Structures are given as C-alpha cells and as structure tokens.
Image: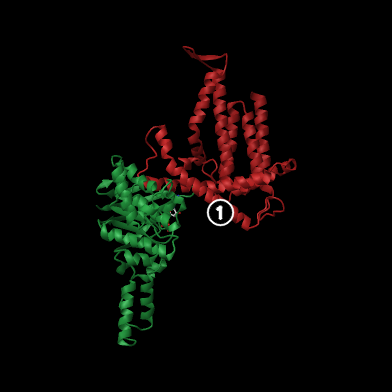
Amino acid sequence: MSIVIEHLNYIYMSGGPYETHALHDVSLTIEDGEFVGLIGHTGSGKSTLVQHLNGLIMPASGRVLVDGMDLSDKQTDRRAIRQKVGLVFQYPENQLFEETVEKDIAFGPKNLGLNEAEIDRRVRDAMRRVALDYDALHDRSVFELSGGQMRRVAIAGVLAMEPRVLVLDEPCAGLDPRGREEILGLIRDLHREAGTTVVMVSHSMDDVASLAERVIVMNHGEVVMDGTPRDVFACGEELRGMGLDVPQAAQLAQKLRERGFGIPQGIYRIEEIRAEIARIAAQGGRHA
Amino acid sequence: MLKDITLGQYFPGHSPIHRMDPRMKLILTIAYIVGVFMVSNLPGYALALAFLYLVVRLSGIRFAYLLKGVKPLRFIILFTFVLNLLFTEGETVLFSLGFFTLTAEALESATFFALRLVFLVMGTSVLTLTTSPVQLTDGLERLMRPLQRFHFPAHELAMMMTIALRFIPTLLEETDKIQKAQMARGADFESGNLLARAKAMIPLLVPLFVSAFRRANDLAMAMEARCYRGGDHRTRLRELRYTRLDAIGALATAAFIAVVVLEGRLLG
Ligand SMILES: Nc1ncnc2c1ncn2[C@@H]1O[C@H](COP(=O)(O)OP(=O)(O)OP(=O)(O)O)[C@@H](O)[C@H]1O
Ligand SMILES: [Mg+2]
C-alpha cells in the first residue's frame, strides 16, 4: 500500500492577514514497508504534510493518493483511510479522555464498529506492543499514569486501529532519555516484526539515523532532500544551512577526519564510527 | 468557520487609525454607533457609510475584508428584517396577500433596523481590527477607572478580559488539534442525530478542559511568581497618551454626528 503525493500545496488562513503558504509543490511517494524519517527546521511544514496523509486536512491544490484512492474525492471513505494510515500527533497524551486505559485504547476500534471480542483482542495486542502490562494497568485512570506511560497509551490507541502505515509526529518530544529509548524501541519492533510502514517526524538526527531507511528533508514548505541517510547526512553544510545538523556519529567522524585520521566519508551510525575507531586503535596510530 | 469572523480580530498596522489612543477609539466608536442610531432616513445612512469608508481607507484595511465580517451574521440580520417586516404596524399599504399586508412603515423600519445592525457590526469591527487586544483592554480599564471609587473591579475585569482574549486563539488551536487527533482514531463529529453528536463531543471536551485547567494553573503560578497582586501600585510599561490624531478623530466624529442631526431635522 503506497502513498503518492503529487504537487501538493497548502495555505493556512488563506486571504487573511496571517496567510501562511505552508507547503509548496510537494511531490513524493512512500512505498509499502519503508521507514521514512522526516526532518526539517521548526515551521518547515512537517506537521502540515503528515496531516495530509490521512485526509485530516485537504490540499489547496495537488493530490494525495492512498492505495490509489484520491483523498480529496468525495467518494473516498475517510474513516477507512484513517484506519489504514494511523497518525500519532505530537504530545498525543493530550488527547486521552476515557476513564480507564482500556476504554481509551478501545476508542478507535469501537469507532470502526468492531465486535467486543475483537476490540478486546486489539486492546491487549496494542498494550503488548507498547510494553504496557494489561493486567496491571487496564482499569487504571489515564490521568494517574506517568508522562511516558500516557504517551504509550496514546500510541496504543492508534495501534489498536491496526494501521498499515504509522505516522508519528515527534513521538519522543519531551521525554527523558530512557523514555525516548523505549518509544524508539517499540517503533523499531513494529516496523521489523509487523512490517508496518513508518513515517517518523523528528528533530533528533540521531533518532532518525538509528531507525530510518530513507530521510526526507523539508525547508520552508518544500522537500529539499530525499534519499538514504548516508547520502543525506553526507551533506553536512547544506543541513546546517537549514538550521539542522548531522548525527553525532557523523560529527565525530568529521572532527576525526579534520585531525588527519583516515575515516571514510558517509559514516553516520554509532556502530560504524565505533568500528572505525577500534580499527584505528588496533593499527595503533594516526594517518592510517 | 470561526475563523471567518472579523469581529474581534486584529489586523496589525501603523495607520493613523491604528496609532490613535484606544480610549479615544472606544469613545468614538460608541459615539459613531449612537450617531448611526439617530439616523432616520436613507441619505443619513449614505453619510454614515461614507464616514465609515473614509475611516477604513485611512486604516489601510480593505473594505471588502470588513464586509466579509458581516457575512456570518447575515442570517441574524435577515431574521430581524423579516420579523420587523411582519410585526410593524402601519397605514400605507403597499401590497397585500391573504392576511399578510406589507406597509411602507414596516418596510422602512425593517430596512433601518437591518442597516443599524450592519453598521453596529462594521463600526465595532473597525475598532477591533485596528486595536490590539492588549491596547483595547488597557483602554477599557482606564475608562472604567473612575468607577473604582464605587468598588467597581475595573482592573480585575480588564485583567480577566486580557487573559480571555489572550487564550481564545490558543484554545481554538488546541480544540482543532484534539479534534483532529480524535478523527485520526475514527471519531465522527459530523453525522448522527443530536444525542449522538452531543456524545461525540465528550472525546473533545474532556481533553480540552483538562488542558484549559492546566493552563490556568500554570498561568496563576507564573503570575504569582512574578509578584502579581492586583491593580493597586502597578506601574505601566506604556502610558496611554492623547495626541493630535485623537483630537482630529474626535472632531471628525463630532462633525459627523452634527451633520446627521442637522440632516435629520431638515429632511426627516
Ligand atoms: N493551525 C495553523 N494555523 C495557521 N498557521 C499554521 C497552523 N499550523 C501551522 N501553521 C504555520 O504553517 C507553517 C508550517 O507549520 P508546521 O506546523 O507544519 O511546521 P513543523 O515543521 O511541523 O514545525 P515544528 O517542527 O515546529 O513542529 C508554519 O509557518 C506555521 O506557523
Ligand atoms: Mg510540527
């Protein structure tokens, strides 16, 4: 199931004093099974773009096709699209409202009109995927949980729809390092085990480097780079010019290169730089 | 949509109208509306329109933008027009169909009533479009200050208005976001009967209230942390001052009212 975006434009508050042209002629295709990292400086249009993917906002011009169905088309069943493309907003814990964890996660499946048994299965499955203990937590109030737990309940609420494509808008924003690791881990597992297509918006180059197979860079509402992490993170100068940076491993590689160590170009992962440093250390010196 | 309402929106700028003292603008807006309500014939309304047009041109705002603000209210205006048409008594029968008779008096009173509403909306829109919310409440507070002698909570009221105005856009944005988040989980806010729709609001209202209370709490703490103790002994960053612009505005409005009154005497 692919998502095709053709010449997409979007304007906020068209005609008013604060008109913002948030997306300019964006065209791209997201293939089945990909893991896409979407990066860009604040205000570059990432959130606006991802809200087009399940028809929450409609293009000013251009098209979005999910599975061949045009989202602007009146005939298209929006709810079916939203089941296929699950969207986790930034700070999703702000949307929790039910009395218990179980009921909140069941909200989506209920809206799909599933039967009790299926809803129960999905709630348990979603809680397992986000590493929440069903027996201990299912009848707790959502407002009694810790921030990290609330975030996971919110993500489970979207997973319970069993989407083919999972879109996450800065899923780790505002979490401590441990919380980040947990969320990133569950996204990684979902992609590997269930084969879910993932689109992840992130401000952290390191998170993108460790997970994504493809990186899309946005700047002022346009897609300016689109390629493998290796290619994109090789363009340190351009990225810095847009208020972004390269992952720490790539920064370290660059610093070592400047000091005269023979580190090959295109290194951006922690494991790679670790291996390189080990190799140099084993050779016992500079200018290897 | 909520965003179509120009009443209450601010259109930033540096025109002479923008630079006038908010107190004077408040007074002159009220004076203008009183003037419009004194108008009793069509040339008078033409005059009121001409005056408004002049002010809007000076403010640099497109007149069409102001008219757009009247659009969401068209049903209310139409409704009052029809009501007046039906229930005003009169003698000069223009037209009669069954038990319905249209009299010249009813037509006149309905038209004038509708026009007054339109001018009321447009007049206040000019005020809010050219005055930032902060200035507006500042002006209101200063105008209400003499009432404090009678234990009228002018400062508290103004502070409450400032805070409300400050948070309306934030809460609208928040509502929009929560609504979208629930729609992403298959929620449907648009179809079903009244009961179903009311129930569909729960997933929207609960998070909204939670967030509003949290914001209110944060704000209260932030204000206390900065030693806010109410209106007494507070000094201001920007003192309000009347300038030549205000004198010109006052004279122009006074002239408008004088002409309206005279014209009413002569023609009406
Ligand atoms: N609801 C809205 N109303 C008006 N303008 C908006 C709205 N949402 C976003 N914008 C504007 O559209 C542009 C793109 O915003 P968007 O939220 O898509 O950026 P972003 O890349 O997600 O930024 P961030 O990294 O800060 O989340 C910005 O200039 C923003 O000010
Ligand atoms: Mg965003």
Label 1: which secondary element: helix
The residue at 57%/46% (across/down) is: B164
Q: Is residue B246 visible?
A: no
Name which residue lies at 32% across and 64% down.
Answer: A211
Image x and y of residue B232, in percent: 71, 51
For this orientation, the residue located farthest to the front is A135
Mark 1 Cα-neighbour bin, 10 Å: few <14, some 14–19, many ≥20: few
Question: Would you say B156 lies left or right of B93 here?
Answer: right
Q: Amino acid at mark 1?
A: Asp
Q: For chain A, give the colour.
A: green
Which chain letter goes with mark 1?
B
Q: Colour of chain B?
A: red
Residue found at x 65% / y 26%: B264
Compared across the picture, whether B234 is left or right of A43 comes to: right
- Which sits in the foreground, A286 or B207? B207
**Residue A197 coordinates in the image, percent (x, y):** 28, 56
Residue B50, image x, y percentages? 58, 36
Return the residue nearer the eye: A214 or B22.
Answer: A214
Q: Is residue A16 left or right of residue B223?
A: left
The residue singled out by tag 1 in the image is B218
Q: Quadrant of ligand 1?
A: bottom left
Residue situated in front as seen by the camera: A251 or B207: B207
Is residue B19 visible in the rendered image? The answer is yes
